[in-house]
Image (cartoon, rainbow, N blue to C red):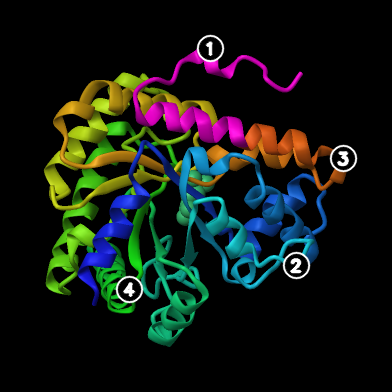
Amino acid sequence: MNAKELIKTANSLVADAKGILAMDESFPTCNKRFAKLGIPQTEEARRTYRELIATTHGLGESISGAILFDETIRQRTNDGTPMIKVLINAGIIPGIKVDTGAKDMAGHPGEKISEGLDGLRERLIEYYQMGARFAKWRAVIAIGDSIPSQACSEANAQTLARYAALCQEAGLVPIVEPEVLMDGGHTMERCFEVTEEVLHTVFNQLYTQGVMLEGMILKPNMVLPGLTCPKQESADDIADATVKCFRRAVPAAVPGITFLSGGQSAELASARLNAMNVRFKSEIPWELSFSFGRAIQQPALEIWHGEEANVLKAQQALYHRAKCNFAARRGEYTDAMESPILS
Ligand code: 13P
């Protein structure tokens, strides 16, 4: 393990108010989003879309790293440049999703365990040689009447920690992603309880497995009410609850917390991240940043719609969302930034 290199990469991913762009949707997820918009679910359509993202002019002004899917890291742009090289040339650190998906957990209806540890050491060596410098593993935790179970949080936490240790051995910074899902009618208080418990379990396992906290990034959910909960708290209340929860459970040695968006609208994700930085930036030990997928990409995907003629407008929308989140990192995001830019 090259501790110095890992620490440098981890810090670069959260430096200068920049954040991470998640563009690592697996085949089923990407195809589902394309199908909704009537975009063909082909390798070429996925390649074209990822090229649109990677070649967005000025993306590196607000994006420090981009997470790719295995298919994408092997693809080239129309002019034959490897996709990974396009990112590096834009000053963006390439990362790679390495879990192979969240599968139904035996004996635990409604719960999932993420897979992908078999053969991971060899895959990580190959990704490092290709130029990736960080990786991502997503575990999902659902909230329900009697879930999450201890079995689900412990199994996912241990898997995340084993993945993280393998990444550090290979020179890749692990992004550790325990996602407590927004689906359901649970309250923000319930999300707080579950998130705190999950984070304690994860950091316990990271410690047990010997993961160097200075050379990793945490990618969690914000503490939010469920999507169908009648009470939806303000951005300030969500910021307070989220930071309170993370202060209890995330060691100060971790350089950055990069939130996932998890199905929040792009505007709400920016507003909530902004509220956290306005209220707490000067008093917290870690950078509070973003590693959004949908909250950066969705408006651009809808504009693109699979049509070549829409590429430039879609890139403008992507650039705009990245800039909004860059502003939210500094506590400088305002509603005025959302006035129409594309008409
Ligand atoms: P969302 O921001 O769309 O939740 O995606 C982030 C991600 O990478 C999920 O693993």
Query: Which amino acid type is shown beneath numbered disc 4?
Result: Gly
Query: Where is residue 236 shown, x and y percent of the image?
Result: 31, 20
User: In which quadrant will I find the C terminus?
Assistant: top right
Determine the CA span between mark 1 and mark 3: 28 Å
Dot 1 lies on which element? helix
Query: Which amino acid type is shown beneath numbered disc 1?
Result: Ala
Asked if ligand 1 lies within 8 A of label 4, the reply is no
Q: Total number of numbered labels?
A: 4
Report the disc number at residue 80.
Answer: 2
208 and 215: which is toward the camera = 215
Give the label, 1 or 4, closer to the camera: 4
29 and 167: which is toward the camera = 167
Sequence-first disc among 2 and 1: 2
Asked if ligand 1 lies within 8 A of label 1, the reply is no
Q: Badge 3: few (under 14), some or many (20 or more) residues near its Cα, within 10 Å?
A: few
User: Residue tagged by mark 3?
Assistant: 309
Query: Where is residue 241 shown, x and y percent of the image?
Result: 24, 30
**Which span of residues is magenta-colored?**
319-343
User: Residue tagged by mark 4?
Assistant: 171
Query: Which amino acid type is shown beneath numbered disc 2?
Result: Gly
Dot 3 lies on which element? helix
Residue 336 among magenta residues: yes
Give the label, 2 or 1, closer to the camera: 2
Q: Badge 2: few (under 14), some or many (20 or more) residues near its Cα, within 10 Å?
A: few
For the view shown, which residue lies furthest in the front direction? 89
Sequence-first disc among 4 and 2: 2
Determine the CA span between mark 2 and mark 1: 40 Å
User: Residue tagged by mark 1?
Assistant: 336
Question: Does residue 30 appear anywhere in the picture?
Answer: yes
Dot 2 lies on which element? loop
The answer to whether 214 is drawn above or below residue 56 in the figure is below
